[in-house]
Image (spheres, rainbow, N blue to C red):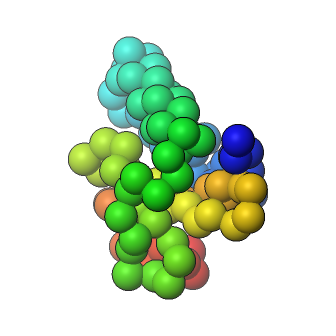
Amino acid sequence: MLSVNWSEISQKDYNKNIDYLLSEWSEKVAKKFIKEVERTLNLLVKNPKMYPLSDYEGIRKAVITKQITLYYKIEKDNIILIRFWNSYQNSDFMTD
């Protein structure tokens, strides 16, 4: 079974998205996002290649919500979470 490893930036992205949802929407919306991330991670552990490759070599993307996409890569027995990219962000996701 593969293990899931969060990069420092993926953890920051995740927390930033939750903070945004709590401040601009509601606790209910934030909880829905958290549950959707948990569901996606459970699916990834079972079938890590189920989501398509992105434009970045070896990096896959899983749409969490209409606005937020998880970028990740598979390395040996690990799934490395790279970013929880909010489509409202303006810069290149690999350099932000």
Residue at (34% x, 50% y) in the render: 63
Residue at (25% x, 47% y) in the render: 66
Where the N terminus falls, by quadrant?
A: top right
The residue furthest top is 28
Q: Position of residue 3 (x, y in %)?
A: 73, 45
Number of marks present in the image shown: 0
- Please tell me whether residue 78 is drawn above or below residue 25 in the rendered image: below
Q: Is residue 50 left or right of residue 83?
A: left
**Nearest the eye: 4 or 96:** 4
The residue furthest left is 66
**Nearest the eye: 26 or 34:** 34
Confirm whether residue 86 shows in the render.
no
Confirm whether residue 26 shows in the render.
yes
**Nearest the eye: 67 or 27:** 67
Q: Position of residue 81 (x, y in %)?
A: 62, 56
Q: Position of residue 95 (x, y in %)?
A: 57, 81
**Nearest the eye: 52 or 83:** 52
- Please tell me whether residue 75 is drawn above or below residue 14 in the rendered image: below
Residue at (40% x, 71% y) in the render: 53
Q: In this view, does 56 lie to the left or right of 10?
A: left
Where the C terminus falls, by quadrant?
A: bottom right
